[in-house]
Image (cartoon, rainbow, N blue to C red):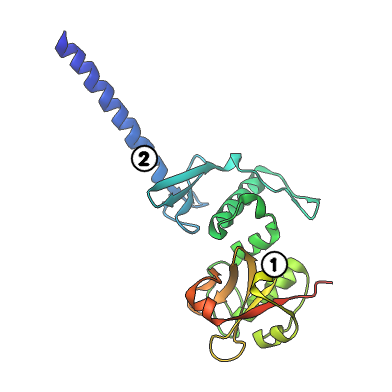
Amino acid sequence: MNKLKACFVFLAFAGSCQLAAAQSSVNKIKITAGGENTSPNFINEISFTPEGILQNTVSGGSKSIKVNEVPVVTKVNNVAMDESPSTVEKLSAIQYKYAMMLDVDMESVENLSLFDFIEKWFGTHYRMGGTSENGIDCSAFTSTLLSEVYGCSVPRTAYEQYGATEHVKKDDLKEGDLVFFNTRGGVSHVGLYLANDYFVHSSSSQGVTISSLEDGYYSRKFICGGRVDRE
């Protein structure tokens, strides 16, 4: 009788181990749009599982959220957006990704045209004088962003953009303001402020990326912000 009981206990334990192993394998699967099992990441190990769950590896473990349970902003400036499943899933992923990157609540990631633009350009290589997705420099990136997202124009170079904007202090920065830096003498680098001291820019070392004004390098090189006249 004791042997039979021990056998049942062993089978139950083995079954639970197999279930845990299977679940672990599922959580490690990351897929591309083509369905191939690869390991693409957004940033900070954010990825999709086949079940539509966004996984984010963090120190000490991981956290996940189902895409279809993510609250989605479906209006921009009171204009209703396409709420098809593919659109909702895309916007959910973008909101979640950039909320994580900026360390803000998802509800604050509401300018979807801005973050959709950043998503399109993210990782594009830096190229001095470049103006396309084959390579773009810092001032071409900010001028393209301001034109496509906010519908306003600024001059081509960082120095000219500095001269064409209303200068603001770091503590007064708002989304859409330009941020200027002295990286090699005078106004020589520009990005666009997002939130929580983060800005997007075309970096000579990393291409289009998001950095923090609190970073030692950018903190030392920061000159001021520049507010663009959008009227």
Name the spot of residue 91 as percent of width and height, x first.
Answer: 64, 51
Q: Residue at x 78, y 70 (%)?
A: 151
Residues 26 and 35: in front is: 26
Name the spot of residue 97 as percent of width and height, x first.
Answer: 55, 54
Secondary structure at badge 1 equals loop
**177 over 220 or under it: above or below:** above
Q: Which residue is mark 1?
A: 174
Label 2 crowd (10 A; few <14 / some 14-19 / many >=20): few
Q: Is residue 67 visible?
A: yes
Residue type, mark 2 in image: Ser
Label 1 crowd (10 A; few <14 / some 14-19 / many >=20): some
Residue type, mark 1 in image: Lys
Q: Is residue 12 shown left or right of residue 190?
A: left
Q: Which residue is mark 2?
A: 24
Name the spot of residue 20 as percent of width and height, x first.
Answer: 34, 34
Q: Residue at x 81, y 52 (%)?
A: 78
Secondary structure at badge 2 equals helix
Residue that lies at the very extreme toward the bottom in this rendered image = 185
Q: Is residue 36 visible?
A: no
